[in-house]
Amino acid sequence: MGATDHRWAFLLNGGGRKHVHRPPYRISRGRVPLQVVSAPSVESWFEEFDPQGVEPFTLVVLDCSELIECVWDEDQWTMHPVEAPLVRASWTLYDEHWQLERRRWFAEWLKEVPEPSPEAVWRFHRSKHTDRADQDLMVDRGFLKTIALSQFVVGPQGWSHRYLDSVSGREIQGGRS
């Protein structure tokens, strides 16, 4: 994650499909959010950034009030606007079927809760959506578990952050008005 007063960037591993891990990479994809938030604009950064040699990623950027998704899948480098609210997950952990399932769960939930509060979204993310613990939003595959949950709420009055360490159960909240 990277952030300034007017731009937030969140990186997810993988770019729209599973990929084969092929190190060494030219730069860590973890540096990408820091680069985009410090650029003059998302568009100028996108045009100048060369993703070749970077492990595939999906970058969701909130720039002022515009939500933008940039995807590098090792073949294509794309940027397009997206509508909020949205749900995304790491392509390194979930195949296309389960990616689509998450989006379906969220879309169905939004029909029931068309203008969800941050608290409602938090509860949605922590709720059980399938009998398959290895594919639920709070995943448990034995050797691999969701260890943290973060929520950022950005609005005209400032921002807030909520973090859950799901191993210890400790929750931290903060923000700025």
Image (cartoon, grey):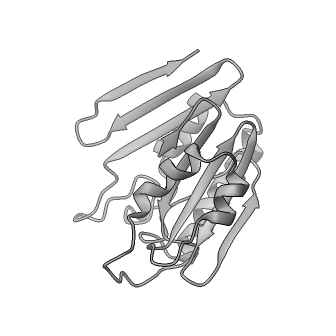
Number of numbered callouts drawn? 0
Viewer-nearest residue: 147 or 123: 147
Viewer-nearest residue: 45 or 2: 45
Of all residues, the one furthest to the top in this rendering is 177
Residue positioned 54% across, 35% down in the render: 152
Residue positioned 50% across, 76% down in the render: 95
Which x, y percent locates residue 36?
A: 57, 51
Quadrant where the C terminus lies? top right
Q: Is residue 146 left or right of residue 11?
A: left
Which x, y percent locates residue 9?
A: 56, 47
Viewer-nearest residue: 107 or 174: 174
Tell me the quarter of the picture where residue 44 sits.
bottom right
Q: Is residue 30 left or right of residue 61?
A: left
Which x, y percent locates residue 50?
A: 56, 71
Residue positioned 57% across, 68% down in the render: 99
Residue 54 position (above or below residue 168):
below
Tell me the quarter of the picture where residue 82 sits.
bottom right
Residue 142 position (above or below residue 113):
below
Residue 70 position (above or below residue 96):
above
Q: Is residue 85 left or right of residue 133?
A: right
Which x, y percent locates residue 52?
A: 51, 78
Residue positioned 49% across, 59% down in the render: 12
